[in-house]
Amino acid sequence: MNNKNGLFITVTTLLILCSAVLPAEAALPENFDISKNYYSVYGGPDLNATLVGDNQFSRGDTATLNINMMNKGEISGFKSEKDADIGNYADEMLQQSEMQYEAQATTAVGILATLKSDNPDIKVKSEPQEAGTLKQGKESSNPTKFTIEINKDTPAGIYPLTLDLSYQYQNNVQVGGDDFDSVTGLVTNKEVGIWYENKTQTQTINIEVKKEPYFEVTNVTGDLYPDEGGMLYVTYKNTGEETAKDSTVRISASDPFSTTDDQAYLGTLKSGDSEVAVFDMDVDETATPKPYSLSSEIFYEDSDGHDQTSDTIKINTEVLEGKNSLPGFELVTGITMALAAFFVMFRRKKQH
C-alpha cells in the first residue's frame, strides 16, 4: 500500500511468532540473503522476574503469586557485514534504516510464562500464562498470576519454584530496495525482512512455608449412645515447629450431637506435645448408629505474642447402638415381663 509520500514498504517476517520452537543457533532462513545484510547485532532481551508481596505462606494455604517482569536487555555491539556503496543514495538510506531496525533486537515478543514445582507438597494449579511483549528497560504493566496449593503436611522451609520465560526476539534484519526518490529522500520499494529466534530464560522463585504450630488429632475415645451421649476424649498433638501458648480448643457440635461443654483448655503445647481435651456430649435419641465427623479449632498465642486460630481440625467418632437395642435385650425383657405376670397371678390365686 502506498502512503502519502508514495513509499511502498514490504515487511517480511521470516520466522513468525506462532511457529515451532527452533534452536537458539538456528541456521539462516533460506530466503534471508546475507549478502544484502548490512549489520549483525550482539545482545538481546534479558528478562528479570520478581515476586511481588510476601513470599511466606502457611501449610495448607492456597495462594496467588504475583510475578512482575522487567526487561534489562541491552545491545552489546554491532558487526558491519556490508558497507553501503558511496554515492548510491538508495544503498546509504537502506543501511541507515537497517541500523534503526536492529536497535529493536532487545524487545521480548510474545512472552509465555510457565511456573513449575518439583516438590509434590507444592502444586502449581495455573496453566502457562501469556505476558505480552516487553521492550528494553520496561516493566510489565500488570503482574503475571499463578495459583499454588501447599499441602497441609508440608514441612517448614524454603521451596524453589522454576519459572520458564519463553519468547521470541529479533535476531537479524535485512532491508532491500533500489528505487530512490530524490524529492522525498526515501527508498520507495523498500523491503524489510526480520528473522526471529526463540529463547527461554529460566529463573527460580523462592517461597517459604512458615514455622508455626500445627495441630492434629491423634486419638479419640468415648462411648456415645443415642439419647444418652457420653464423655468424648480427644488427644491433640502439636506437630508443628513452634510453641502454642494458652491453647484452648472449641468443638462445633452438629446434628445429632449437642453440648453445653464445647471448650477445653490445653495450655502451652511445645512442638511434639500432646494434650487430651474432654467434652460432655449429648446425642439425639433418633441418632443413627454410624461414624460421624465433628469439627474443632484451637485458639492460641504464637511466639510473637499474636492471637491465632488454627485451621479446622476434624474429630472422627461414632454413635454406638443404643443399649436398649443390644442383642438379647428384647428376649430378656420379654422373659422378665412374663415372670412378673406369672408372679402376680400366683399371688392372686394364693390369696384366694
Image (spheres, helix red, strand yellow):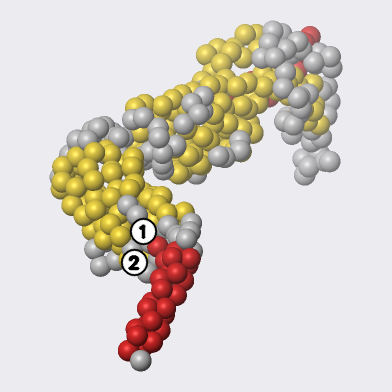
Q: Secondary structure at mark 1?
A: loop
Is residue 11 depicted above or below 221 in this figure?
above
CA separation, marks 1 and 2?
Answer: 7 Å
x and y percentages locating residue 328 in the rendered image: 47, 61
Q: Quadrant of residue 227?
A: bottom left
Compared across the picture, whether 85 is left or right of 69 comes to right
Q: Amino acid at mark 1?
A: Leu
Residue under the point 44% across and 37% down? 150
Do the residues bearing badges 1 and 2 touch, measured as CB atoms within 8 Å? yes
Residue at 38% in and 81% down: 346
Q: Is residue 215 above or below residue 121?
A: below
**Of 339 and 195, which appears nearest the observer?**
339
Whether residue 303 sits left or right of residue 60 in the image: it is left
Vertical order, 254 against 241 (above or below)? below
Q: How many marks?
A: 2
Direction from residue 33 to residue 144 in the image, left or right: left
User: Could you tell me residue 126's position as x and y percent?
Assistant: 57, 40
Q: Residue at x 15, y 46 (%)?
A: 267
Q: Secondary structure at mark 2?
A: loop
Name the residue at 19% across, 47% down: 266
Label 1 environment density (alpha carbons within 10 Å; few <14, some 14–19, many ≥20): many
In x, y percent, where is residue 83? 70, 9
Q: Locate the C terminus and report the quarter of the image it occupies.
A: bottom left
Task: Evaluate whether residue 161 shows in this view.
Answer: yes
Residue 241, percent across and down? 26, 32
The quarter of the picture where residue 167 lies is top right
Tag 2 residue: 228
Question: How crowded is the residue under tag 2: few (<14 C-alpha within 10 Å), some, or many (20+)?
Answer: some
Amino acid residing under circle 2: Glu
**Viewer-proximal residue among 68 and 119:** 119
Q: Which mark is residue 224?
A: 1
